Amino acid sequence: MALPARTARTETAPALPTPSSSASVPVPPTRGPAPWWRRWPAWAPHATAAWGVAYATAQTLWAATGTAVPMAGDRHTPAALQLLLAALALLAAVCLATTRPLTRRARRAVGGALVVLIPALGWGVIGLPLYVVVLLSGSGLESATSLAHLLLLTPGTALLGMVAVSYRRRGRGLCLRCGHPHPGDGEGPLSHPDVSTAPRGTRRAAYVLLCGLLPWSVVKTVWLFGGDAIGVSGEAWQREMEADATGGARALASVGVDVTVLAALLGVFLTLGLTHRWGQVFPRWTLLLAGRRVPRLLPLIPAWLTGFALALYGTLLTCGALLMAAGVLSKPEPEGVFTTGSGLAWMVAFGGLAFGGLGWGLLVAARSYAGRTRPRCVLGAAAAKQPSTQAS
C-alpha cells in the first residue's frame, strides 16, 4: 500500500517552473512608461543626428565667415579643418539616426563610423578642465568662440558614447537600458545593487595614479610661497600670476592657495568618492541629503568627461617629455618665467604626470563605479534569481 501512496503524491505535486517557462518569472506591475532619461537608447541616436546637423552648420558658418576659433596658443583652426569636422558631424547624423535592427554590413558601417568619430570629434573636449578652472576662478575668457565650440563639442561626444553603448548592447542581445540579458522590453522599474567599495586592486591602481600629482603640486606650492624650483623664482612666478589672474584666482593666491592645485584636489575628491561607499549614498555631512542614494550619473558624467580630457592631454605631455629626454625632440626654448630649457622640460614632464595620473585615475575609478552601481531591470533581477530558487 505504500507504493501507491507515494505515486499519488508524485502525481499531485506541482511541477517546478523552468527558466524557459513564461510562469517562472513574475512580471511586476508597471506604472506607465519609464521616464525619458531612462529611455536614452531610443532617443540617443536621433539626438546625435540632430547634434551632428547643428555642429556641421556652426563649423561651416565659421569657415565661411572667417571666424577665428583658437586651437592652441596663438594658432587658430584652419577653414579646411573646420569643413572636415563639419563633414564628420554630418557622417554621424547619417549613420546614427536609426534605432531599427541593422544588417551585418550596416552594423560594421556604424561601428567603423563610431571608431572614427569619437576620437576625431572628442579631441576638443581636452580643453574642458581648463575652462572649468578659468570659470571657477573668475579669470575671464580669452575667446567666447572657443567656449562656444567646446559647449557644442562636449554634448556631442557624450551622445556618441551613449550611441556606442546602445549599439554594443543591441548587437549582443542585451537589454538596452540596463545592459543585462533578460526577457522583456526593459520598461519596468529598476533594482539597484547594494552599496559597495571598489575592489582592492582598483583602489590601489587609482591611488598610484593620483601620486602623479605630487611633483607638479609641490613645485606650484613652492612657487606660491616664494621659493625657487626648476630654474624659476617664486617672485617672478607670483608677479606673472598677479598680472594674468583676476577675481577668484587672485583672491585664492593671496591666502596661499593655487587655483589649479585646488582644482586637482577636487579631482582627487571625485576619485575617492567613486571608489568608496560614500560615493553611492550621501554621507552625514551632506545634511539634508544624508542617507539618500547618489544618482549614479552625478559623479560619472564629470569623471568620464574630465578623465578623458586629462588622460589624453597628460599622455601627450608625457610622451613629449620622454622624447625630449631621449633626444628625439629638442628641449624647448625658455620663455616666460622659465630661465632654462631644462626647467621648462621638467615642468612638461610634471604636468604630464599630474594630468595623466589624475585623468587615468578618474577613468579607472569611474569604470569600477559604473559596474558596481549599474541597476538591473526588476524583471531581469527576478530571472537571475530564479535558478537559485529552483535549486533550493
Image (cartoon, rainbow, N blue to C red):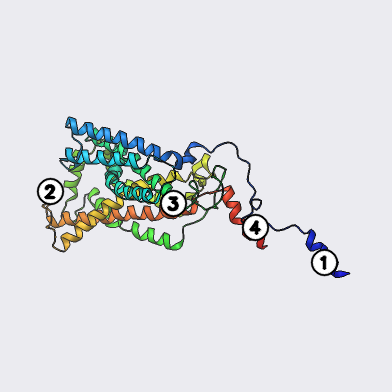
Distance from Cα at disc 3 to Cα at disc 1: 50 Å
Residue 245 position, x and y percent, is 23, 39
Residue pointed to by mark 2: 335
Q: Nearer the viewer, residue 334 or 71?
A: 71
Instruction: Kindly indicate the quadrant of the structure image that contains residue 152.
Output: top left
Give the amino acid at mark 2: Glu
Q: Nearer the viewer, residue 391 or 150?
A: 391
Distance from Cα at disc 4 to Cα at disc 3: 27 Å
Q: Is there a contact, CB below 8 Å, between mark 4 and mark 1?
A: no
Q: Is residue 294 left or right of 105 when viewed as pictured?
A: right
Which label is found at residue 18? Answer: 4
Distance from Cα at disc 2 to Cα at disc 4: 74 Å
SS for tag 1? Answer: helix
Residue pointed to by mark 1: 6
Q: Is there a contact, CB below 8 Å, between mark 1 and mark 2?
A: no
SS for tag 4? Answer: loop
Give the amino acid at mark 4: Thr
Which label is found at residue 171? Answer: 3
Q: Is residue 346 left or right of 312 when viewed as pictured?
A: left
Whichever of labels 4 and 3 marks the residue nearer the N terminus, that label is 4
Give the amino acid at mark 3: Gly
Q: Is residue 149 left or right of 80 when viewed as pictured?
A: right
Residue 247 position, x and y percent, is 27, 35
